[in-house]
Image: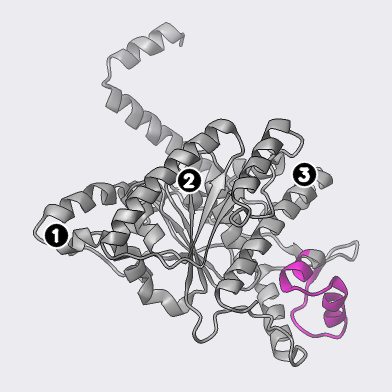
Amino acid sequence: MNEAVVDAEMMSLHFDEIILGQGELISDKLNILRQEQYPPDAKKGLRQFSMAEVAYFLGVTPSNIKKLHLEGKGPTPATSSSGRRSYTAEQMLELRDYLDKHGRPGKLPYIPKRRPGEELHVISVVNFKGGSGKTTTASHLAQHLALKGHRVLAIDLDPQASLTALHGIQPELDEVPSLYDSLRYDDKRVPISEVIRSTNFPNLDIVPANLELQEYEYDTPLAMTGSDATAGKAFFTRISSALREVDDHYDVVVVDCPPQLGYLTLTSLTASSSVLVTVHPQMLDVMSMSQFLLMLGGVMKTIREAGAEMQLKWFRYLVTRYEPTDGPQKQMVGFLQAMFPNQMLQAAMLKSTAISDAGITKQTLYEVERLQFVRSTYDRAISSLNAVNDEIAELIHKGWGRL
C-alpha cells in the first residue's frame, strides 16, 4: 500500500482515533515481545552472579566465598564446565545471612537493615527535563541497594511508567494499580500495601505507575477548593502518610519523580530524607536545571510557610551520561563542581552503550550478562554505576549516623 493511500485512509479518521489505534498497536507488539523474552509466563527472571560479583555485593573477597563453598558452608553454587561458580540473588541473601551469623565479633554486620532509632530513608530522584538519566539512576540505585542487602521499595511516580516497564510490568495490560490509588482524595483510596508488587530482585519491591497517576495533578487543586479543603491544602503529606503503613518493612525508598514540577513531585519531595538531582552536563540542560531550581525553591518556600518543613539528610547533584573525553562536558562538570563543591557527587554516571543497549531489552546493567558486551565496555559502565551507588549508600548510612 503506497503512502498516498495510507494518508487518505488516515484522513478519514479523527486524530484521537488514529493515536488510540497506534497506541494499542504498540502495546500489543510490546506484549508479544515480552511473551517471547520471558517465557512461559511473561515474568522477568534474574541471571546468576559470578563469584567476583557476589564478593563485591557482600563486601568480602572472592577467596572468602570460595573457602565457604569448599568447606560446605552456605548455599551450593552452580558450577560451569570450566569450573566457574555462580550464585542466584536468593543464594546471595543466604550467604549474607550465614556471614552475618558467623562473622567475627566487633565487625560491621553483613545485613545492613535499619536499626532501632533509624528512620526510613526516602530518596527522590528529580529533574525538570526528560532524558537526564533519572529513571536509569533510580532503577540501578534501587537494585544496587537491594543486592547490597537493604530492603528497598521503588516508587514509579512518572505516568510514563518507564521504571515500571524496566521491572517487567506493562501497566495497560497487567492492570496494576499505582500510587494514585493510595493518594486519591475519595473513598476509593487504598493502603499502599495493596499496590506494592514484588520484582525479580529479592529485597526489592515496586509501586508501579500508570496513566491514572496524572489524575492526582487535576484532583489536588480541586480538593483545595472542595468540601474537604483541608485535605487538599495538606496534599504534601500524602506520600509520607501512605508510607507509614509499611515503614517497618523497608530500609530505603527510591522515588522516580516525573520530569515536571507538579503536585506529584512536590508531594514526593516533602516526604523525602534526601534529594538527588540528575544533571546532563550540557549547556541547555544546565540552563533548564537552573529554571527548575528557581521554580522549585519558590514553590517549596510556599509549602514550608504552610507548615511542611523538609528535614533533609542530604541533597546532591549527580552528573549523568557523562563523556570525560568531551571537552565542553568536562568544562561544564568543572563549572558545577566549582559552584557546588559540597553538593556534587564525586562519582559520575558515564555515558555507555552497555547501559543503552541493556535498556533496549528493558533490562538494567545488573540484569544483563557481561558476555553480551565487549568486556571493557561493560566493565567501564558497571564500575561507574557501582561507584555512584556506593557513594549514595554511604550517604544513606551517614544519614543514619553509622559513619
**Front disc: 2 or 3:** 2
Instruction: Using a 10 Å C-alpha cutoff, classify the residue at mark 1 as few (fewer than 14 neighbours), some (14 to 19) or many (20 or more).
Output: some
Image location of residue 30, percent across then percent down: 50, 40
- Picture quarter with the C terminus: bottom right
How far across and how far down the image is residue 328, in percent?
Answer: 68, 31
Residue 83 belongs to magenta span:
no
Question: Which residue is identified by label 1?
Answer: 229
**Where does the magenta region start and end?**
53-78
Relative to the observer, which residue lies in front, 236 or 204?
236
Depth check, front residue: 223 or 299: 299
Q: Which comes sooner in the sequence, label 2 or label 3?
A: 2
| Dot 2 amino acid type | Asn
Residue that numbered label 3 is attached to: 373
Residue appearing at x 72%, y 69% in the figure: 57
Tell me if residue 65 is in the magenta stretch.
yes
In the rendered structure, are the residues bearing label 2 and label 3 in contact, judged by CB atoms less than 8 Å apart? no
